[in-house]
Amino acid sequence: MKKKKNNQNKNVSIPSLLEILFVSTRLGLTSFGGPIAHLGYFHEEYIRRRKWMDEKHYADLVALCQFLPGPASSQVGIGIGVMRAGVLGGIVSFLGFTIPSVLALIVFALLMQGLDIGSAGWIQGLKIVAVAVVAHAIIGMAQKLTPDLKRKAIALLSLVVTLLWQTAYTQIGIILLSGFIGFLIYKKQYK
């Protein structure tokens, strides 16, 4: 009797690992603006352009990574790599995305010792570009994740409360309360 191969034991091709390495390294070299901006870049590259997963799976992965301790954007990148090519794909994705940042931090730290680049105009320009990328990603995800008025209302209420009371406990409370309200509103729809 033949034993079925499990997904964990699948053979991963070198070309798929190289593709993951190439894409994640490019993102590591060009993704500025912090974790939220990274999620926007990931959405644009992995979901819209390459279609490596659909919107729902991406939203679920982002939600899961928000609950886990640590940097959510790196975890999402690793998760996409794992889903694409197993554990080795996750490792390659992590290395590709992280090594450019590590090298850039080392270079900037060495430059900051001798020069005053903290107030340079091009740094301010990078911040403005990051805001535009984040806004673009939020609008794109909002169109897919809040298609009806009820979900838009939950998202808007969550946004207002988050902006008014900026604590870690508020964020946890909003996540739990929004999930509960969504459950009550949509429980009949998913039975």
Image (cartoon, rainbow, N blue to C red):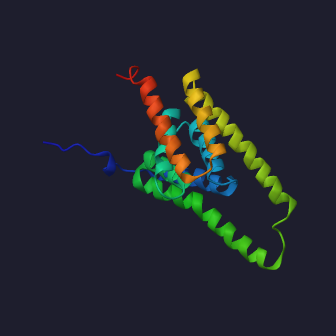
Classify residue 93 as left or right of residue 33. left
Q: How many marks?
A: 0
Classify residue 37 as left or right of residue 2. right
Q: Position of residue 165 (x, y in %)?
A: 62, 47
Measuring 31% from the left and 51% from the top, which residue is drawn there? Answer: 9
**In which quadrant of the rendered view does residue 154 lie?**
top right
Q: Nearer the viewer, residue 12 or 161?
A: 161
As drawn, the residue found furthest toward the front would be 165
Q: Position of residue 55 (x, y in %)?
A: 53, 34
As drawn, the residue found furthest toward the bottom would be 114
Q: Which image quarter is the N terminus in?
A: top left
Measuring 45% from the left and 24% from the top, which residue is drawn there? Answer: 185
Residue 148 visible (yes or no):
no
Q: Which image quarter is the C terminus in?
A: top left
Classify residue 178 as left or right of residue 131. left
Classify residue 97 as left or right of residue 13. right
Q: Position of residue 41 (x, y in %)?
A: 64, 45
Measuring 62% from the left and 32% from the top, which residue is drawn there? Answer: 156
As drawn, the residue found furthest toward the left would be 1
Q: Nearer the viewer, residue 124 or 28?
A: 124
Residue 24 visible (yes or no):
yes
Q: Position of residue 30 (x, y in %)?
A: 69, 53
Measuring 60% from the left and 33% from the top, which residue is drawn there? Answer: 157
